[in-house]
Image (spheres, helix red, strand yellow):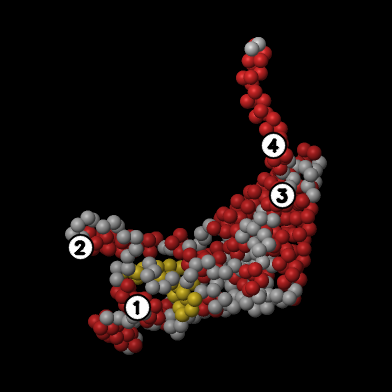
Amino acid sequence: MSLFGMIKSALQPLLNWASLVTLAHPFQQPWTSPTILVPILMALRIDCVHKALAQLAGGILVPVPFSFGTYTPRHIPSSHLRSNKLPGWASYAVKNLLYASVGDAVLMPPAEAPCLVFNAKSGHGRNNASWLIGRVFRDYESWMDTAVRARIAELLDERNHHLQQSSKGTAPPRPRQAGLCISVYAPSKSKRAGVPTHGLLYWTGLVVVLMQMVIAAVPFALSGDMSIRRITLGGTILALTTGSLSQWKAEKWACRRKSSDPYILTSGNGAQHVIMILGNGQGLHLEDLAAGKTRRSSSISSRLYIAGVSFLWLCLLVFAAGLAQNTGYLLAIGSIGTLQNVFASSLSQNPSMLGVHLEFMEVVGETKVFAALKALEGKYKGAGQCLLREFFPGGLRPGEQEEWDTLTGRAAEGQDEGVSQARKD
């Protein structure tokens, strides 16, 4: 074999690989010129936008940046909600165009965390149907007072010490839960309930919107292409317009204000935490809110508003599908917006950022649930009683029942601190 033949034989695998790359060129096209990716990404079902709007809604300016994907409002009848599987921006627009004029568009998402809400005055309890209460309760361990954290650590130490003392063999692991910890808060007298304060999510949203505008200006500065700038500006205006709808505020705080009743939040029997919110005439009526009274019919103006915004979103999707150049900039703009939406939808916030302003009062915690409820009842008449049926559905032991009867007898004579004292304060 000649030298040329030997070289050709040695390079044959490389030549075969090159031919495969050439044949695969059509598959590389979407990545080198991602024109088709933009409308596809905009049509993805990314529900984080829905929760990001719920987190920040309530004011005139709701900085939820333009991104890929959208939220899907719930509608009545619910059969349409479960059967309709259209994705993303297209789903949002089509659903609203079909149902906004004939159905009841509910903007707020459903409650995320299972939670019970008790009125400590009447003893009545109900399952929570409010996204706002569910989010406040779900994120409690991220915003609870330092005194509560310290008491939890003490309860765990006490429980661990007891387990170590009673163990005869291998030492048991440190428990992750011990007894019951009841945190008592009061509505703030200096901040108005239902008016959220601006925090990290709000300001990062504004920063991302500005970043998107700067990126959109680059192709115009380099080549005079205005298409990216127009789509970004249009998407941002539509996003801000969607969040500014007054119906968001009406649904988010769908309750009476200046409540004088005390409320208790808990996940039920077996919970580590119970949150009690005193009634001082400054807070939200949580029993109203938990009932989910946002199911009333939307006004005609709200339905027309939603239908108009939905139609404009569809127009924007069609316009984005016609892009022929500089689509990489739009991918970058939508991607950072999506990342911010994911961050905003999942971040734990202080209740003040959701319009629920609370001030810590005290913590009641014991390694035995009965002892904790008894201590709570001794301080706030009726509070321990309404929880007794939840944490002891089978009833108390004879000795415990006698202790409880004795305690409630003293409470009836006015020897407890009670909720009435909190009202005077």
* Residue lying at 77% horizontally and 38% vertically, measured from the top left: 222
Judged from the image, the secondary structure of the residue bearing numbered disc 3 is helix
Asked if the residue under mark 1 is in contact with the one under mark 3, i.e. CB atoms within 8 Å, the reply is no
* Alpha carbon distance from label 3 to label 1: 56 Å
Q: Which mark is residue 24?
A: 4
Residue at mark 2: 166
Judged from the image, the secondary structure of the residue bearing numbered disc 4 is loop
Q: Which of 290 and 15 is in front in this view?
A: 15
Mark 4 or 2: in front is: 4
Q: Which of marks 3 and 1 is nearer the N terminus?
A: 3
Q: Which amino acid does label 2 sit on?
A: Ser
Total labels drawn: 4
Judged from the image, the secondary structure of the residue bearing numbered disc 1 is loop
Q: Quadrant of the C terminus?
A: bottom left
Residue at mark 1: 392
Q: Which amino acid does label 1 sit on?
A: Phe
Q: Nearer the viewer, residue 6 or 15?
A: 6
Q: Earlier in the sequence, mark 2 or mark 3?
A: 3
Q: What residue type is labelled 3?
A: Val
Q: Which amino acid does label 4 sit on?
A: Ala
Q: Earlier in the sequence, mark 4 or mark 1?
A: 4
* Residue lying at 65% horizontally and 29% vertically, measured from the top left: 17
Q: In this view, does 64 lie to the left or right of 363?
A: right
Asked if the residue under mark 2 is in contact with the one under mark 4, i.e. CB atoms within 8 Å, the reply is no
Q: How crowded is mark 3: few (under 14 residues within 10 Å), some or many (20 or more)?
A: many
